[in-house]
Image (spheres, rainbow, N blue to C red):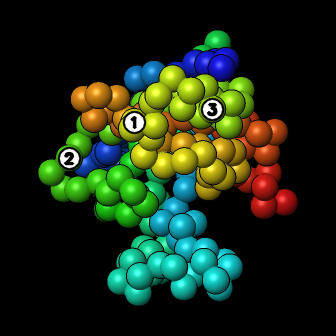
């Protein structure tokens, strides 16, 4: 298992644009890419059937609303991010709420997510796994776990096409 670094920390924001402006102004961070609630609407009709009608209606009614803005650190810290979540409330398994603001989770990057998972389970840590390794919306691979106190931890494996590497715009060309 090769852990590269803490890749990002996620915050649920009361005012997303105000938070973006703060991190730009104070820390010199820049927006790398943004995910929208509409990005969670599957294009595949079979996957569409797996979403409740209530959730699908919510996602469609908020499809052009920003869900997460990835802010990248400048200079030598390039490649490390803050995830700023809109408090609207459509994160797939970790629903932000009007009562919860601030720290949400932290993320580490690994070279090989399947190998990381294998080594974890060899050590008997299955009880801490919440979501098995799989593809992520940002074109990489992710899994979720928690520590003994319940603090959420996201594990990421970037690919050459991961938005963290190339941004979102290059994928749409």
- Residue 145 visible in the picture: no
Up-down relation of residue 158 to residue 90 (above or below):
above
**Which element is circle 2 on?**
loop
**Which element is circle 3 on?**
helix
Q: Residue at x 39, y 36 (%)?
A: 128
Q: Which residue is mark 2?
A: 100
Looking at the rendered image, the disc whose residue lies closer to the viewer, 2 or 1, is: 1
Question: How many discs appear?
Answer: 3
* Sequence-first tag of 2 and 3: 2
Looking at the rendered image, the disc whose residue lies closer to the viewer, 2 or 3, is: 3
Q: Residue at x 31, y 62 (%)?
A: 88
Query: Residues under labels 2 and 3: Cα distance?
Result: 33 Å
| Residue in the foreground of this view, choosing between 127 and 68 | 127
Q: Which residue is mark 3?
A: 118
Q: Residue furthest left?
A: 99
* Sequence-first tag of 3 and 1: 3
| Residue 147, quarter of the rendered image | top left
Query: Residues under labels 2 and 1: Cα distance?
Result: 22 Å
**Which element is circle 1 on?**
helix
| Residue 141, quarter of the rendered image | top right
Q: Residue at x 51, y 23 (%)?
A: 123
Up-down relation of residue 166 to residue 121 (above or below):
below
Query: Residues under labels 3 and 1: Cα distance?
Result: 13 Å
Q: Which residue is mark 1?
A: 128
| Left or right: where 3 falls relative to 9 | right
Instruction: Give the image location of residue 6, x and y in percent.
Output: 52, 22
* Sequence-first tag of 2 and 1: 2
Instruction: Give the image location of residue 129, x and y in percent.
Output: 45, 40
Badges 2 and 1: C-beta atoms under 8 Å apart? no
């Amino acid at each position: 298992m090769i852990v590269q670094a803490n890749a990002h920390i996620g915050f649920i924001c009361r005012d997303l644009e105000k938070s973006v402006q703060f991190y730009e102004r104070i820390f010199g961070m820049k927006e790398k890419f943004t995910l929208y609630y509409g990005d969670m609407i599957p294009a595949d009709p079979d996957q569409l059937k797996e979403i409740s009608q209530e959730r699908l209606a919510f996602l469609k009614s908020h499809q052009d609303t920003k869900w997460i803005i990835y802010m990248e650190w400048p200079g030598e810290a390039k490649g490390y991010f803050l995830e700023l979540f809109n408090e609207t409330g459509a994160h797939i398994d970790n629903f932000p709420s009007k009562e919860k603001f601030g720290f949400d989770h932290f993320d580490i990057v690994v070279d090989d997510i399947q190998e990381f998972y294998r080594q974890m389970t060899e050590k008997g840590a299955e009880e801490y796994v919440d979501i098995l390794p799989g593809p992520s919306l940002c074109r990489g691979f992710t899994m979720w776990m928690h520590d003994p106190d319940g603090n959420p931890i996201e594990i990421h494996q970037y690919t050459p096409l991961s938005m963290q590497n190339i941004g979102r715009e290059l994928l749409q060309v």
